[in-house]
Amino acid sequence: MQRDIVIIGGAIMGASVAYFLREEGFAGSIAVIERDQSFAKAATTLSCASIRQQFSIPENIRLSRFTLSFFRELKERFGAGADIAFREKGYLILASEDGRAILEANHAVQMQEGVDIALLSAGELEARFRWLSAEGIAAGAYGRSGEGWFDAHALLGLIRKSLKARDIDLVQGEVRAVERQADSIKAVVLADGTRIEAALVVNAAGPNAGGVGAMAGIDLPVEPRKRSVFVFEAADRFDDMPLLVDPSGVYVRPEGGVYITGGAEDHESDGAADPADFEPDWSLFEERIWPVLATRIPAFEALRPGRAWAGHYDYNTLDQNAVIGPHPEIANFMFANGFSGHGLQQAPAVGKALAELIVHGEYRTIDCAAFGYGRIREGRSFRELNVI
Ligand SMILES: Cc1cc2nc3c(=O)[nH]c(=O)nc-3n(C[C@H](O)[C@H](O)[C@H](O)COP(=O)(O)OP(=O)(O)OC[C@H]3O[C@@H](n4cnc5c(N)ncnc54)[C@H](O)[C@@H]3O)c2cc1C
């Protein structure tokens, strides 16, 4: 078998790259290879499906802004019935006195990018959000528009369905080997022995991206990191509640008639997850999350815990930021990896950027050069400070 482009991983990143290749006019053959088309363990479907503009570096803001415009064009792109239940309720990122300078610096970057974020004092926060306690809080940044949450399954479904109509092969199979000769990738080999020759390969393997890189002899510092999400009920409903991020890292937001929360893991000290471990860590909820929720939102002292799930972040251990674009020497191996907790919202933008690079030989809409693999090899970090 031979294909012009082989994409390894068919969840949101792989599907977005394939979609935009056709949008940019690529007429060659494309295969998207996915080992589990139920996506039951993909980061995409286990995520919190939220989108924000509040990043610390302009490139990440631009990626999310592109996705926001993509959300606003869904019906034109996918038809009148297209709906991902986008709830534009904002993010509210809180800072203690220690974190105030960083919050303000990030806000200045966001303002330069034209984002609609308000910087509020502790008093303004309590006046604006009646359910909030600003104890220990110096300031908060609130996204008045362009931020919120949506249905990740619906987004993935829309894009993948459109691939079938665009003559893209959706292949069920697990890539077990990537054949490389000197500085060129020749083929991928699936678990059932099928060999697919490829002129170009895109790594869209999410938390397994480091493993796929290793198959090609490429060192990519992306590993799975387990992240638990807990569902709870509370007697009170707060219709104006954004996705709130406490200075401790704990986040909470409404989800229909319940709430979801997480963010208690220690990014610095938790290591790579066992790829088969999807067991939520309830001790995080009991010991770290609930006390924070009860302090920040006094009505949550009496919450009722419900179910929980765990997924894996596609965690870039160097700088918690994406790796996008070609390998500097192995030019027919492309990365779309390492999004460290913000890849769902960036996927349409990354798909667009990579497709432009492949089809036109340059980034046209969003310059992703700063995300290139060169920095990985040099050990030079391009750090995003707002990792949630
Ligand atoms: C708990 C949690 C909350 C999150 N919340 C958010 C959020 O609110 N907003 C946000 O933007 N992001 C969030 N993220 C991050 C986001 O989900 C990911 O960055 C994004 O989904 C990555 O997409 P992906 O397609 O690269 O990876 P995945 O969705 O993991 O897909 C990779 C696919 O590759 C397949 N694959 C892997 N190896 C092979 C192989 N060898 N052969 C064939 N197929 C293979 C897998 O089966 C999988 O389907 C969250 C993640 C988690 C875990």
Image (spheres, rainbow, N blue to C red):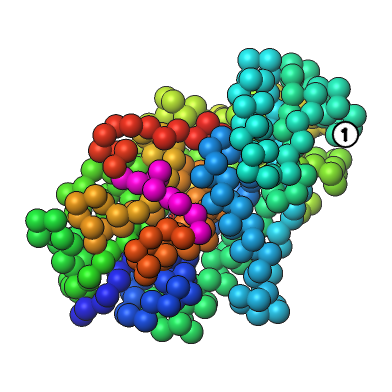
Outermost residue, left side? 182
In magenta segment, residue 371? yes
Give the residues drawn in magenta, as a range.
Answer: 365-373
Q: Please determine whether, in this image, residue 59 is positioned above or below residue 387.
A: below
- The residue nearer to you, when weighing 145 against 157, is 145
- Who's the residue at 34% across and 64% down the image? 361
In magenta segment, residue 27? no
- In the image, residue 28 lies at what x, y percent? 32, 80
Residue 363 in which image quadrant: bottom left
- The residue nearer to you, when weighing 329 against 80, is 329
- Who's the residue at 58% across and 38% down the image? 55
Q: Which residue is mark 1?
A: 128
- The residue nearer to you, when weighing 307 against 82, is 82
Q: Classify residue 172 as left or right of residue 266.
A: left
Residue 370 in which image quadrant: top left
Q: Classify residue 277 as left or right of residue 332.
A: right
Three-letter amino acid code at the position of disc 1: Arg
- Who's the residue at 34% across and 76% down the image? 30
- Quadrant into which the C terminus falls: top right
- In the image, residue 328 lies at what x, y percent? 24, 50
- In the image, residue 247 lies at what x, y percent? 65, 25
All told, the count of numbered labels is 1
- The residue nearer to you, when weighing 162 against 287, is 162
Q: Classify residue 297 as left or right of residue 68.
A: right
- Who's the residue at 30% across and 38% down the image? 376
- In the image, residue 216 lies at what x, y percent? 19, 54
Residue 177 in which image quadrant: bottom left
Q: Is residue 294 visible?
A: no
